[in-house]
């Protein structure tokens, strides 16, 4: 018997009590009914048993088999002839599936008539279910294997016609297996008030209407074809949240925020999305692209799906602060072709920050516009950007008139394909390069720059830098590299050409880091006047051009000479020559160099006073080798060591040691055989010296110079003809002659000099001379007629000023000769001064001798007084106004005239006799008159007499002989004539009258002893000697020429003197 207590028809206890009372009260009817239903009860009892004990297990198993999932049906809560209501039921998870469903109730409907044919067609209604649906790793939502109906072992056939869901909730979780970089998975809940799934042969239809937790509705209609493994879905939504969309669909991009609406038809094959068709509009959606710098936020616009292509139409979105209008396509194979244009000019700093480029070390101003193309695989998109400036922009304080750029972002790398900048300060800059965007893994960048004609001065003014030199146009090729996250640590390398100081500088191996800079520089034609710390007015380099090659480096903290290191070589033209600076170094403001000066014109050096420079030195050339040190900020700290030489046209001055410390210099000079020609009447020959000079180069004046050293004059100075050596020193005020020696002459003393007036103030020299040969003294050439000789001892002083120096001292003259007159030793005194003239008083040391020589000259070297006596020869003269009157007694003409014969006609070979008389000389024109000349025993060649009396006078170089009378024995001769003694051809014209006399006396006067003597005239005779008597000679007589009273002229080759007339 079937125990039905566990399966009551109704759960109401009052109904059961009435039934029992009815049985008790109506026992009759009970038996009647019992008997009536015995036949029917058997069938119903079995039916009850089948439904309660057999059907549920029989349904549970085929449904599990049909769904290929374990199904657990709840207890029977109600039963009718057409259906059963079950309690809590579930579809369980499996080892491979996390999906499950738990329903509060399940209603199963069936056709009882088909039970007779052992066939069960089921319709299942799930009430108040809570489901969980999760994508598997294959991105399938539901993995159902619906099996065809089949007969079980008891012969029953089971099939499910449809499944209906009422008042249920579904939790959905998306799998991010394929897109791990997108936002994390979330669970989305959907209220499903009604859903229906119907099954037909080989296909499934469903219609689900849901309501999301945010209140938005969604409707999904679909068809599943079992044999083809095809799903067709149609989704209608309105204001569907993007996070919900992500839960339903696997999109190639991650979207969040905002909402979408539209209709989408999806087609899946083999559980994979095969096609999308439809339109979606979205608003304020954020889109995240894989490997993109940032989200696209606040996006709104329209997307069309067609043939596996997503078309973007008029989408406005924001990349950081960059607002763009976007159009383009996204292909189902994840290929992008998107164009974006900025809607308005953007601040450069906003663009950089939006691209996640650290611009903290890059100061920018101004705005740009751009066009963006996004192409390629969505996982590795390539972004092409074209940028132009909108108005004046500024980068790192440099104002730019024009900016154009072609950029490409791909595979975590920003590629600068082309960047052109036109600075307002002039010139042009272009660049290409790469910037890596891998974050901490790789933030490196490398950009190649090319600059053309950038104005250096304006560039420096931008950074408020005062350059130490005038910089012109700059051009070059550079590479900027480093880490863009720390842009201020970047490094710049390259080559540059700079117009510098009127010339050019080529900079190779240029390298500029955050703290330092450096390079190899080649200079050509740079004006020295443009360089700092060089006083060209002082050193005379106004027209000098500098060339050089050097390595230079410094600090970027401040462009200052103290922060510069330099090593190299330089050269420049100076004073007609060249200066080479080798091994030049600058470090911490200190500098040093080895300077070689080649052939610098001495006269062109700025420290030289050309007006006071002797002519011999004006063509001189300086050569030097100097080791120079100094400090760039303290020009007075220059230190120089070296040597050199001054090559003069006729000599060399060697500087064996030169030093300069703090503008104070010392030079040890040496000259050998330096000619003194044209340096004044007091100098001749050459000089050799070793002199040390000291002074200050900033004050090269006599009062600030010191010198000491030795001088050797090869031919003496002034009146000293023999070599003279001197040791002298100068202290800026006076020249101290420590010792001067010249072949018996010694001098020492002081010469005081007035530097302000540039004249000698006074002289005070002590002079000692021993055995000085008068012939070696430089006396006036006019005194050569006197044929002076002798040895002089002198001890005295030279004192006074240069304009009127005075020489005074004691004199001893030994072996003194004057005009061939020999004197005994003379002693006396000598005074000589420019203002007072010469006063010489000498007399014989031998008291028995009357020899003396007194001479007085005025300041113009004109005689004032003379008193000379040698034995019986006396000459005494005294000045009378402009005349100098001389009285001569017993002058031996044969001795005196020996040195005068060259001034007479060459026929006159000898003059003799003792002359006495008076001579009056006009000191204005040096004409003279002699009214009374007497010559005892006169002779001229062969002519001789007893006494000759005549009168002489001179005018314009012609000596007149008047009223001449010669007496010889008893004969008397009268004569007149003219003598022109000076010139190349001295001439004598004379007229001789012979009074009556003895012929024998005449022949004796002319020394005519035979006929041939007549032909010789007055020529001197050559008489034979005793030995000649023994020679065998043949004598012949020349024609006899008797003298007559006609004029006879004795002459050398003719020379006409002015105003020379014959005298008769």
Image (cartoon, rainbow, N blue to C red):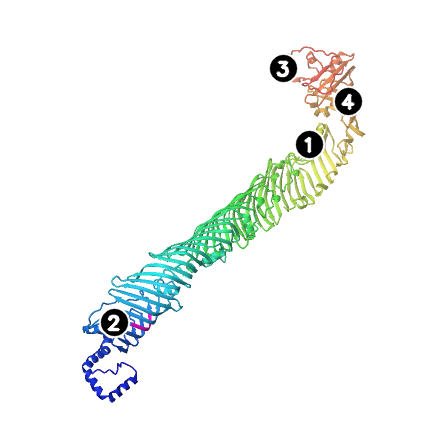
Q: Nearer the viewer, mark 3 or mark 2?
A: 2
Image height of 113 relative to 747, above or below: below
In the displayed structure, does residue 69 sit left or right of residue 1031? left
Spatial separation of the CA atoms under disc 3 and disc 2? 197 Å
Label 1: element kind: helix
- Disc 1, disc 4: CB below 8 Å? no
Q: Secondary structure under badge 4?
A: strand
Residue identifier under label 3? 1031
Q: Quadrant of residue 852?
A: top right
Q: How many marks?
A: 4
Left or right: residue 365 compared with residue 205: right
In depth, the one of 10 and 522 nearer the eye is 10
Neighbourhood count class around disc 3 (C-alpha, 10 Å): few under 14, some 14–19, many 20 upward: few
Left or right relative to 604: residue 498: left
Residue labelled with disc 2:
122
Chain part drawn in magenta: 125-132
Q: Which residue position holds label 4?
A: 953
Q: As rendered, which of 750 and 467 lies closer to the eye? A: 467
Question: Mark 1 or mark 3, which is nearer the start of the sequence?
Answer: 1
Q: Residues within 10 Å of mark 4 (few under 14, many from 20)?
A: some
The image position of residue 954, as x and y in percent, is 76, 23
- Alpha carbon distance from label 1 to label 4: 32 Å
């Amino acid at each position: 018997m079937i125990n039905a207590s566990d399966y009551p028809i109704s759960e109401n206890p009052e109904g059961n009590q009435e039934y029992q009372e009815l049985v008790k009260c109506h026992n009759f009817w009970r038996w009647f009914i019992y008997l009536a239903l015995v036949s029917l009860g058997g069938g119903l009892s079995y039916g009850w048993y089948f439904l309660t004990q057999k059907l549920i297990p029989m349904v549970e198993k085929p449904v599990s088999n049909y769904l290929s999932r374990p199904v657990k049906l709840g207890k029977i809560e109600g039963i009718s002839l057409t259906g059963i209501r079950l309690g809590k039921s579930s579809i369980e998870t499996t080892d491979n599936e996390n999906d499950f469903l738990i329903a509060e109730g399940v209603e199963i409907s069936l056709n009882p008539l088909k039970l007779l044919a052992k066939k069960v067609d089921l319709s299942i209604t799930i009430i108040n279910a809570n489901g969980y649906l999760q994508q598997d790793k294959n991105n399938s939502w539901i993995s159902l294997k619906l099996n065809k109906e089949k007969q079980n072992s008891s012969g029953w056939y089971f099939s499910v016609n449809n499944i209906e869901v009422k008042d249920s909730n579904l939790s959905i979780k998306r799998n991010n297996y394929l897109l791990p970089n997108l936002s994390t998975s979330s669970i989305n809940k959907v209220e499903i008030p009604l859903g229906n799934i119907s099954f037909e042969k080989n296909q499934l239809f469903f219609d689900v209407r849901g309501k999301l937790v945010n209140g938005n509705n969604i409707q999904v209609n679909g068809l599943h074809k079992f044999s083809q493994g095809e799903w067709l879905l149609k989704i209608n939504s309105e204001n569907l949240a993007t996070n919900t969309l992500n839960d339903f669909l696997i999109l190639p991009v991650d979207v969040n925020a905002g909402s979408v609406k539209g209709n989408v038809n999806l087609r899946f094959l083999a559980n994979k999305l095969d096609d999308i068709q439809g339109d979606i509009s979205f608003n304020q959606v954020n889109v995240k692209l894989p490997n993109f710098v940032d989200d696209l936020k606040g996006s709104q616009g329209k997307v069309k799906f067609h043939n596996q292509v997503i078309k973007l139409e008029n989408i406005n979105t924001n990349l950081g602060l960059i607002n763009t209008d976007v159009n383009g396509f996204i292909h189902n194979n994840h290929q992008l072709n998107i164009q974006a244009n900025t809607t308005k000019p953007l601040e450069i700093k906003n663009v950089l920050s939006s691209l996640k480029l650290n611009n903290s070390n890059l100061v920018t101003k101004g705005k740009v516009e751009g066009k963006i193309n996004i192409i390629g695989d969505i996982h590795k998109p390539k972004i092409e950007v074209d940028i132009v400036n909108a108005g004046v922009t500024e980068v790192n304080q440099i104002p730019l008139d024009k900016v154009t750029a072609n950029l490409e972002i791909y595979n975590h790398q920003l590629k600068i394909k082309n960047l052109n900048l036109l600075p307002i300060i002039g010139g042009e800059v272009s660049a290409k390069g790469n910037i890596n965007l891998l974050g901490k893994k790789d933030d490196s960048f490398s950009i190649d720059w090319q600059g053309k004609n950038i104005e250096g001065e304006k560039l420096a003014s931008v950074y408020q830098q005062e350059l130490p030199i005038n910089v012109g146009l700059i051009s070059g090729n550079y590479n900027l590299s480093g880490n863009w996250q720390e842009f201020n640590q970047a490094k710049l390398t390259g080559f540059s050409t700079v117009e510098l100081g009127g010339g050019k500088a080529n900079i190779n191996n240029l390298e500029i880091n955050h703290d330092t800079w450096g390079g190899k520089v080649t200079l050509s034609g740079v004006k020295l006047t443009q360089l700092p710390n060089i006083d060209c007015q002082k050193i005379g380099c106004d027209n000098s051009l500098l060339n050089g090659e050097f390595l230079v480096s410094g600090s970027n903290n401040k462009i200052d000479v103290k922060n510069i290191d330099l090593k190299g070589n330089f050269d420049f033209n100076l004073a007609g020559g060249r200066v080479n600076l080798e091994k030049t170094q600058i470090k911490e403001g200190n500098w040093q160099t080895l300077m070689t000066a080649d052939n610098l014109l001495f006269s062109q050096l700025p420290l030289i006073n050309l007006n006071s420079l002797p002519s011999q030195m004006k063509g001189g050339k300086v050569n030097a080798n100097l080791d120079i040190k100094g400090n760039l900020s303290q020009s007075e700290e220059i230190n120089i060591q070296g040597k050199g030489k001054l090559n003069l046209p006729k000599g060399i001055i060697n500087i064996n040691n030169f030093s300069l410390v703090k503008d104070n210099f010392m030079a040890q000079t040496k000259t050998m055989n330096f000619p003194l020609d044209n340096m004044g009447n007091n100098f001749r020959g050459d000089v050799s010296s070793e002199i040390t000079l000291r002074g200050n180069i900033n004050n090269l004046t006599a009062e600030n110079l010191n010198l000491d050293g030795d001088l050797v004059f090869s031919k003496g100075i002034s009146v000293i003809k023999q070599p003279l050596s001197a040791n002298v020193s100068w202290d800026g005020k006076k020249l101290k002659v420590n010792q001067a020696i010249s072949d018996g002459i010694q001098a020492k003393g002081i010469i005081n000099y007035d530097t302000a007036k540039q004249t000698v103030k006074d002289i005070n020299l002590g002079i000692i001379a021993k055995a000085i040969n008068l012939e070696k003294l430089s006396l006036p050439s006019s005194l050569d007629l006197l044929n002076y000789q002798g040895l002089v001892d002198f001890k005295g002083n030279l004192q006074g000023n240069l304009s009127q120096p005075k020489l005074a001292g004691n004199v001893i003259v030994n072996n003194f000769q004057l005009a061939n007159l020999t004197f005994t030793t003379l002693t006396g005194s000598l005074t000589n001064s420019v203002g007072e003239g010469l006063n010489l008083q000498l007399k014989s040391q031998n008291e028995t001798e009357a020899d003396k020589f007194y001479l007085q000259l005025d300041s113009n070297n004109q005689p004032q007084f003379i008193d000379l006596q040698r034995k019986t020869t006396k000459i005494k003269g005294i000045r009378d106004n402009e005349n100098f009157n001389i009285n001569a007694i017993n002058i031996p003409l044969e001795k005196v005239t020996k040195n005068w014969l060259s001034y007479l006609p060459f026929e006159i070979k000898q003059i003799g006799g003792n002359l006495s008389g008076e001579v009056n000389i006009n000191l204005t024109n040096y004409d003279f008159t002699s009214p009374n000349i007497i010559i005892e025993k006169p002779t001229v060649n062969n002519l001789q007499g007893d006494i000759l009396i005549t009168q002489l006078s001179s005018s314009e170089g012609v000596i007149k002989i008047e009223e001449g009378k010669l007496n010889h024995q008893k004969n008397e001769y009268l004569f007149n004539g003219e003598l022109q003694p000076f010139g190349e051809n001295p001439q004598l014209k004379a007229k001789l009258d012979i009074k009556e006399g003895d012929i024998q006396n005449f022949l004796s006067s002319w020394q005519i002893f035979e006929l041939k003597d007549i032909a010789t005239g007055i020529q001197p005779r050559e008489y034979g000697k005793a030995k000649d008597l023994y020679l065998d000679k043949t004598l012949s007589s020349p024609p006899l020429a008797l003298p007559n009273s006609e004029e006879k002229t004795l002459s050398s080759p003719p020379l006409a003197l002015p105003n020379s007339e014959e005298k008769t």
